[in-house]
Image (cartoon, helix red, strand yellow):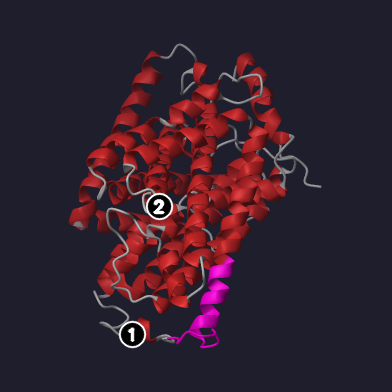
Amino acid sequence: MGNTHKQQEPSTQGQLQNTLKNRHVTMIALGGIIGAGLFVGSGAVINSTGPAAVVSYVLSGTLMFLVMRMIGEMAVANPTAGSISEYARAGLGNWAGFSVGWLYWYMWVIVAAIEAVAGAGILVNYFPHIPPWFLCLVLLVILTLTNLYSVKSFAETEFWFASIKIFAIIFFIAFGAIYLLGFWPGESSPGFSNLYTTGGFFPNGIVAALIGSVTVLFSMGGAEIATIAAAESDQPAKYAAKATNQVMYRIFLFYVVSVFVIVAIVPWNFEFAGVAIQSPFAIALKQLGLPFAPFLMEVVVLTAVLSSLNSCLYITSRSLFTLTKQGDAPKFLVKLNKRGVPVRAILAGTTFGYVGVVLNYFFPETVFLFLINSAGATMLFYYLILAFAQIRLRRRLEKEAPEKLKLKMWLFPYLSYVTILWMFGVIAVMIWIPGTRSQVYLSIVSFGAILAAYMVRSKYSKQTQKTVEFVDQPLKVVK
C-alpha cells in the first residue's frame, strides 16, 4: 500500500479504536444477526414448515456455527485485517479479496433495504393510511442521518438498540416458558400440543424443513461483523475470540429457543405474512393476555430493525474502506468529514435501500421474501471463498506461525470440508426449488460480473497490487 493509504487508515480507524470496547463489539455483532429475519421473517418459515421450523433453525444454526468458527480462526490470527475480504485475499489471492469485498458490500446494502421494508411493514399496522413505501423511505433517511453524525454516536446507539432487543427475547422466552408449563395466571395453556396437532410436527414433510433452512440461513448471516468491529477495538485479538464464541452460542439461544416457544404457543397455520407483515413474537404474546405486550413487542421489533439497519450502514462503509486500501474501489468514497465519518461510503451503502423503497411501492406483498432470497445466495458465495481461504491459511500458519492459532477450527480439515460441502448442498437445494432458482442464477451473474470487473481492473491498472502477507503481519499483544 502506498503512503496515502498509510495516512488514511489511522485517521479512518482512529475514532473507532478510541471508542469501541468489548460491549460495543459484541452488541454490534448481535445487532447485525438479530433483525427482521428473526422477528418478522420467521413467520413465513413457520407457515411453510410447521413446527419443524425448529429443525430448520437448528440446521442453519449449526452451519453458521461452523462458518463463524472458520472466520473467527482467521480473525484471531490476524485481527488487524479490517475486513473479511482480506482473509480471502491472503488465502487465495487478489481476485478473492476483490470478489468477497464487493459481494459482501452488495449483500449488506440489500440487507439495508430488507430492514427498511420490514420496519415499514410493522409501522403500517399503526399508520394504515400512510403508504408502506413512504414509511420505508422515512426509516432509511432517519438511520442514514444517525449514522452520518459520528462513529461514537453510532457505537453507543447500537449498543442500546441491541441491548433492548436481547432483553426482549429473554423476556419473551421466560414468559413463554411459564405459559407453556401451565404456571401462567388466568390463561389456559395448550402445553406443547401445537407441536404435534394440526398435521403433526412435519405437516408439510421433512423436505419442507430442509427447504426452510435456506431462508433461515440468510437471517443468521452477519455474525462475522464481530470480527470486523474487533479489529477496530483496543484489544482486537482478545475481542475477536470472545465475540466469536459469544455470537455462536447466542445464535442458538436467540433463534432456536425463541422459535420453539413461538410454534408451541401459536398454531403453525396462523397466517403471519400478508400486506402488513406481522411479527410472530407479538402474536404469541397475545395468547398470554399481557396488557400492551403485543404493542411493546412490536416496538422492540422496530428497534431491532433499526439496529440491524444501523449495522448495515456501518459494515458497508468499512467494506468500501478496505477495498479502497487495495485500490479496488474509488478513493473518493472514503473521504472523511471533520468527525471522522466516511460520508460518501455510507451514502453509497443506502443505494439499494432506495431501490427497496421503489420495489415496495410496486410489489408490497412480495418484496420482502424476494430480497431475502436474493441476498441469501450471495452470502453463500463469499462464505465458500472464505472457507477455502481458511483451509489454505490454516496450513500456512501451522508451518510458519503456529503461535497465532489461538482459536482453531475443530477437527481440521475434516469439518472445514464438511462445511464447504454443506454450503454447496444449500446452493443445490436453492436451484432445485422453483421459487429460489432465479435468485441463485442472478447471484451467479452478479459474481461473474464482479470477476469480469476484476480482470478488467487487473489488466488496465497502472499500480501493482500486493497480496496481503497474512502470516508476516504482526499480531498485537493481548493483555
Q: Give the label on residue 379, or none.
A: none
Q: Position of residue 284 (x, y in %)?
A: 43, 71
- Residue 2 forms part of the magenta stretch: no
Residue 235's quadrant in the figure? top right
Gap in angstroms between the C-alphas marked 2 and 1: 34 Å
Q: Position of residue 395 (x, y in %)?
A: 56, 49
Q: Position of residue 410 (x, y in %)?
A: 56, 62
Q: Which residues are magenta?
A: 170-189
Answer whether residue 150 is visible to the viewer in this image. yes
With 206 as the anchor, is 122 left or right in this view? right
Q: Give the label on residue 196, or none.
A: 1
Q: Residue furthest right?
A: 479
Looking at numbered disc 2 in the image, what kind of residue is underneath it? Tyr
Looking at numbered disc 1 in the image, what kind of residue is underneath it? Tyr
- Residue 174 forms part of the magenta stretch: yes
Sort mark 2 into few (<14), some (14-19) or many (20+) by Cα contacts within 10 Å. few
Foreground residue among 395 and 350: 350
With respect to residue 376, does 233 lie above or below?
above
Sort mark 1 into few (<14), some (14-19) or many (20+) by Cα contacts within 10 Å. some
Q: Which residue is mark 2?
A: 126
Q: Residue furthest top?
A: 462
With 229 as the anchor, is 474 left or right in this view? right
Foreground residue among 316 and 269: 269
